[in-house]
Image (cartoon, rainbow, N blue to C red):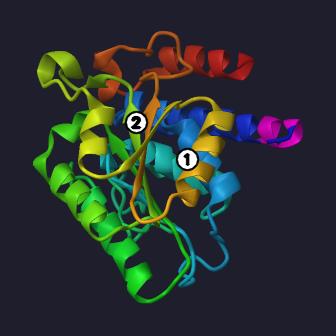
Amino acid sequence: MDKDTLDCLKTKAKNIRKSIINMLTEAKSGHPGGSLSGVEILTYLYFKEMNIDPEEQYKSDRDRFVLSKGHGAPLLYGTLAERGFFPKEELMKLRKINSMLQGHPDMKDTPGVDMSTGSLGQGLSAANGMALSGKLDKKGYRVYVLIGDGELQEGQIWEAAMTAAHYGLDNITAFIDNNGLQIDGFNKDVMNVEPIKDKWKAFGWHTINIDGHDLEQIENAVEEAKSVKGRPTVIIAKTVKGKGVSFMENIADWHGVAPNKEQSEQALKELEVV
């Protein structure tokens, strides 16, 4: 990745983080921690990798994205607005009555959303369906899905993992947002999900470990995934919950609490420095 592209992506990531803080502060509710942790992943996918077009949102050969951890909707909304799927002004209507941006993604009302999500564990199954459909219809699109590491406690994830391997869905790439925390604390204390890599490998997936905030590592992993034939790929991205905001980083309490005005001002100052 050349320096200009990298700098451009870093700017997009900063803008998305600022949007997340602004919309959650306005809404006075939502999920900042896990939204901030996945920013670089979606930045790379939406601004460098995926075949998508805001002017032709439903073209049949577009790449698909599923946010399995649907409570991270502010991350997806901030990315979609930055990419031009709808005006950024809409972000300030998050969670308001009659807004197209509700607490979880809604494919019927929100431009750019490929799958309604929110019930944890279901996103990979939906992504499998999209990937299998692409295989049957001989379409060249790829499907990407972002899964929370706490979400790995859901049994349906492993049924879906088995299914994707069984059907050889090499057109699907799953990202695990491995920030180590969930609403009640550290995953290892609530219900340990490790060893993540060994489990996915045992289910027949090609596995890659990366720093989920390093855009160049994300690029290399995505390119590697595209070269794998006959089986799906999972990219286990080590991330920091609340990334970019000092008082939110690695704090479980920021899983689902919006910042107040003073906290928002501090967060935005820190992000601007970044």
Q: Residue at x 39, y 72 (%)?
A: 131
On the image, the x and y values in percent for residue 124 come to 29, 58
Q: Which residue is mark 2?
A: 177
Q: SS at mark 2?
A: strand
Is 198 on the left-hand or right-hand side of 214? Answer: left
In this picture, which residue range is highlighted in magenta?
Answer: 3-8
Query: Mark 1 and mark 2 in contact (Cβ < 8 Å)?
Result: no
On the image, the x and y values in percent for residue 201 come to 31, 43
How packed is label 1: few (under 14 Cα within 10 Å), some, or many (20 or more)?
many
Q: Amino acid at mark 2?
A: Asp
* Cα gap from disc 2 to disc 1, whole angstroms: 11 Å
How packed is label 2: few (under 14 Cα within 10 Å), some, or many (20 or more)?
many
On the image, the x and y values in percent for residue 21 come to 52, 31
On the image, the x and y values in percent for residue 150 come to 24, 33
Of mark 2 and mark 1, the one earlier in the sequence is 1
Q: SS at mark 1?
A: helix
The quarter of the image holding the N terminus is top right
In the image, residue 168 sits, relative to residue 22, either above or below, namely below
Q: Residue at x 62, y 45 (%)?
A: 43
Along the line of sight, which residue is nearer the eye, 244 or 259? Answer: 244
Residue 88 in view in this figure = no
Q: Is residue 156 magenta?
A: no
Along the line of sight, which residue is nearer the eye, 25 or 118? Answer: 118
Q: Residue at x 51, y 58 (%)?
A: 228
Q: Which residue is mark 1?
A: 42
Q: Amino acid at mark 1?
A: Leu
Q: Residue at x 75, y 36 (%)?
A: 11
Q: Is residue 7 magenta?
A: yes
